[in-house]
Image (cartoon, rainbow, N blue to C red):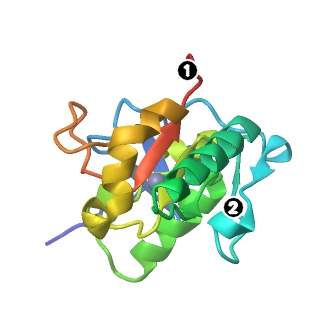
């Protein structure tokens, strides 16, 4: 006889997340990489709509300035950079993952490319996803351009191919850090 596992929905411990009322242990590679820096939504700046289409996308003001400058430089090289994700709150990330689970995706499959809430760099307001925000981005001219020039604007590819943290490659996901000019 199989006894279903029971879980308490309240008070997930560190390295646990509660989704749709079930508590899960956060698996590698996320485990141990919880992000404590969360942006204050009241202090975010909107990425100009010419870089985002209709979506309202918000990042820290420094990140906004850097992505605007970088997109202008890319444009001068004939490359269009378009952003389709910036700040995502804990609650937003939770709802995205809960939606995937509700559609029947197993937890361990869903968290391969969708970070558990509290583990996504998007909560810092300093991470952006470029279009197309999927594996095809590695073949986009924009990706080659970013690899050559993003560092000039203090952007780093967070999860490059073969990264030491064991994260899946996310060529579309870049993070702004303060850096020397
Ligand atoms: Zn991302």
The quadrant holding residue 156 is: top left
**Furthest-top residue in view?**
180
Q: Position of residue 90 (x, y in %)?
A: 62, 51
Q: Residue drawn 20% across and 45% down?
A: 161
- The answer to whether residue 86 is above or below residue 55 is above
Q: Position of residue 47 (x, y in %)?
A: 71, 56
Return the mark for residue 77: none
- The answer to whether residue 181 is above or below residue 123 is above
Judge left or right: residue 121 versus residue 38.
Answer: left
Q: Which residue is mark 2?
A: 57
Ligand 1 under 8 Å from disc 2 Cβ? no
Q: Nearer the viewer, mark 1 or mark 2?
A: 1
Q: Nearer the viewer, residue 57 or 89?
A: 57
How many residues crowd around disc 1 within 10 Å: few (fewer than 14), some, or many (20 or more)? few
Q: Residue drawn 33% across and 43% down?
A: 147
Secondary element at image label 1:
loop
Q: Which residue is mark 1?
A: 179
Assign the N terminus to one quadrant of the image.
bottom left
Count of numbered tags: 2
Q: Residue drawn 55% across and 60% down?
A: 94
Q: Residue drawn 16% across and 40% down?
A: 162
Ligand 1 under 8 Å from disc 1 Cβ? no
Q: Nearer the viewer, residue 100 or 136?
A: 136
Residue 8 visible in image: no
Q: Position of residue 157 (x, y in %)?
A: 37, 41
Secondary element at image label 2:
loop
Residue 48 visible in image: yes
The first of marks 1 and 2 along the sequence is: 2
How many residues crowd around disc 2 within 10 Å: few (fewer than 14), some, or many (20 or more)? many
């Amino acid at each position: 006889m199989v006894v279903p596992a029971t879980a308490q929905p309240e008070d997930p411990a560190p390295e646990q997340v509660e989704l749709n009322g079930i508590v899960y242990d956060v698996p590698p590679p996320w485990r141990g990489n919880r992000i404590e820096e969360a942006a204050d939504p009241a202090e975010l700046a909107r990425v100009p709509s010419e870089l985002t289409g209709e979506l309202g996308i918000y990042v820290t003001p420094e990140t906004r300035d850097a992505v605007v400058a970088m997109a202008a430089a890319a444009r001068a090289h004939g490359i269009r950079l378009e952003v389709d994700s910036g700040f995502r709150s804990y609650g937003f990330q939770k709802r995205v993952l809960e939606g995937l689970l509700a559609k029947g995706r197993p937890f361990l499959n869903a968290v391969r490319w969708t970070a558990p809430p509290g583990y996504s760099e998007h909560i810092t307001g300093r991470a952006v996803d470029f279009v197309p925000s999927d594996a095809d981005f590695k073949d986009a001219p924009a990706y080659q351009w970013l690899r050559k020039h993003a560092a000039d604007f203090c952007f780093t590819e967070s999860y490059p191919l073969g990264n030491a943290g064991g994260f899946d490659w996310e060529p579309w996901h870049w993070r702004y850090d303060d850096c020397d000019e």
